[in-house]
Image: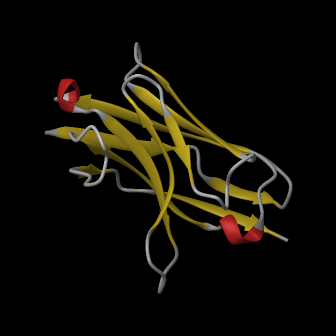
Amino acid sequence: QVQLVESGGGLVQAGESLRLSCAASGSIFSVNVMGWYRQVPGKQRELVATITRSGYTNYADSVKGRFTISRDNAKNTIYLQMNNLKPEDTAVYHCASSREYTGTNYDYWGQGTQVTVSS
């Protein structure tokens, strides 16, 4: 099993920045792709960004140029640097891990951290 714990959420004003962290533990040798998702009540969960074991990244169009996903393998942690935040970025952000090389399906999820952006 893989345990994922997110941190770093909070309340900010539009235009400000936040950095989310996701610390992984357990059977992390099985993880090939990690990702950040976000969810707003009543809406479908949205993929925000992914990063492979080798560092290849992918982003949703809505966050390209503003968000950066990165990883620190020594700390078994991934990060999501969020700049120029907008009210529409308000959501609960979850990190997730996948054993697949494509990252199509995710096996483990963190509990989530709330990000609220005021206008």
Q: What residue is rendered at 58% in x and 56% in y?
A: 60
Q: Position of residue 22 (x, y in %)?
A: 44, 38
Q: Position of residue 52 (x, y in %)?
A: 39, 32
Q: Position of residue 80 (x, y in %)?
A: 58, 41
Q: Is residue 62 left or right of residue 108?
A: right
42 over 104 or under it: above or below:
below
Q: What residue is rendered at 31% in x and 46% in y?
A: 103
User: Is residue 80 or residue 119 the one in the foreground?
Assistant: 80
Q: What residue is rendered at 69% in x and 50% in y?
A: 64
Q: What residue is rendered at 34% in x and 51% in y?
A: 110
119 over 85 or under it: above or below:
below
User: Is residue 75 or residue 10 the one in the foreground?
Assistant: 75
Quadrant holding the N terminus: top left
Residue closest to the far front: 102
Q: How many marks?
A: 0
Q: Is residue 56 left or right of residue 85?
A: left
User: Is residue 57 or residue 86 the one in the foreground?
Assistant: 57
Q: Quadrant of residue 119?
A: bottom right
